[in-house]
Amino acid sequence: MHKIFKSSVFCGGSLINPEKIEFFSDNTIVYKQNNILNHSQFSISLPIYNIISIDIFPKIFGNQIVIRSFNRSDIIANGFSDKQTKIIKSFITA
């Protein structure tokens, strides 16, 4: 199973720096943030068993997702819809 969730401009995500949360079949989460201006990419990879908590903060447009882990490399992602955040939370807690 390989599932990709992308931030949306309509939900408060960035047009220039889109964010992605990917789930892989080996129980790994990868957070990617592309920067179109200088062609670089920021990436964090976490195994699901290292996750302590997942918090969802509603904003005016979309939601902010905060995923905390044991190794203190937290994921803070913006611009995801309500439906996407529910699915992401269910993948992590299942």
Image: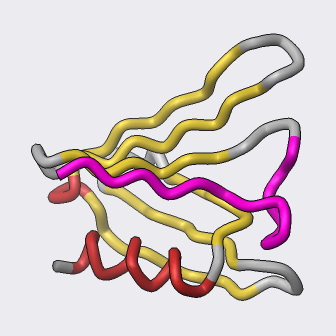
- Which percent across, then down, holds residue 20? 55, 47
Out of 34 and 48, give the one closest to the viewer: 34
Using the image as rendered, state which of residue 76 and residue 6 is in the foreground.
Answer: 6
Relative to 2, 20 lies left or right: right
Residue at 45% x, 36% y is 44
Residue 91 on image: x %, y %: 27, 72
Which residue sits at x=17%, y=52%? 1
Check the image and name the residue furthest to the left: 26
Left or right: 81 with respect to 9? Answer: left
What span is in magenta? 1-15
The residue lying at 51 percent from left, 30 percent from top is 43
Residue 10, quarter of the rendered image = bottom right
Q: How many marks?
A: 0
Drawn side of residue 89 relative to residue 34, left or right? left
Q: Quadrant of the C terminus?
A: bottom left
Q: Quadrant of residue 58?
A: bottom right
Q: Is residue 35 above or below residue 84?
A: above
Q: Is residue 85 covered in magenta?
A: no
Residue 80 x %, y %: 65, 69
Q: Would you say 9 lies left or right of 70 here?
A: right
For residue 33, what is the image quadrant? Answer: top right
Give me the residue at 60% from left, 27% from top.
42
Report the coloring of the rendering.
secondary structure
27 versus 84 height, above or below: above
